[in-house]
Image (spheres, rainbow, N blue to C red):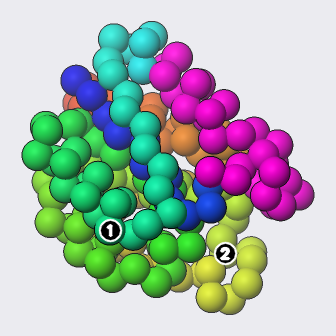
Amino acid sequence: MAYLLLNGPNLNRLGVREPDIYGSAALHDIEKKLQQIAGENHTELQAKQSNHEGELIDAIHLAADDGLEGIIFNPGAYSHTSYALRDAISSVDIPVIEVHISNIHEREAFRHTSVLSAVTIGQIVGLGVLGYELAFSALLKLNKGEVKE
């Protein structure tokens, strides 16, 4: 079994970008923690970050084509604007959980709506980097049959 941790634009700047909003953890810290969780659960985790919409779309398609079990996806600002990412998610038959470090519903009005949430199995917002761990836990439980989509 394998999963994909997918991060969108500007998330490579975690730890230095607006730490009052996003905290001090760097992306490699999040990846390291999720790799640890993957190892404890005898599974694999692939990690990818891109600032380019097309690369994120390709990663979603490849995850499905390679038979991955699920995607933990922080699309960053693309969650509010990218119908192409929405179409990519709806075109694959694997569960995707959308994660946002900050509570997008307490921020600027343009961040309140995610065009992706309707095609994901869930959305975790406002819990900081813990949201990634919760999303991974949910996917692991889903694939063990402990929770339903």
Q: Residue at x 50, y 80 (%)?
A: 80
Which amino acid lies under the numbered mark 1 shown in the image of this protein?
Answer: Gly
Q: Is residue 141 visible?
A: no
1 over 42 or under it: above or below: below
Residue 66 visible in the shown view: yes
68, above or below 51, in the image: above
Q: Which residues are magenta?
A: 12-37
Real-space Cα separation, disc 2 to disc 1, in angstroms: 26 Å
Q: Which residue is mark 2?
A: 105
Dot 2 amino acid type = His
Q: Is residue 70 above or below residue 59?
A: above
Residue sitting at 22 percent across and 24 percent down?
Answer: 1
Residue at figure coordinates x 75%, y 39% from the top left: 25
Whether tag 2 and tag 1 are in contact, CB under 8 A, the answer is no
Q: Residues within 10 Å of mark 1 (few under 14, many from 20)?
A: few
Of the two numbered discs 2 and 1 on the same chain, state the one appearing first in sequence: 1
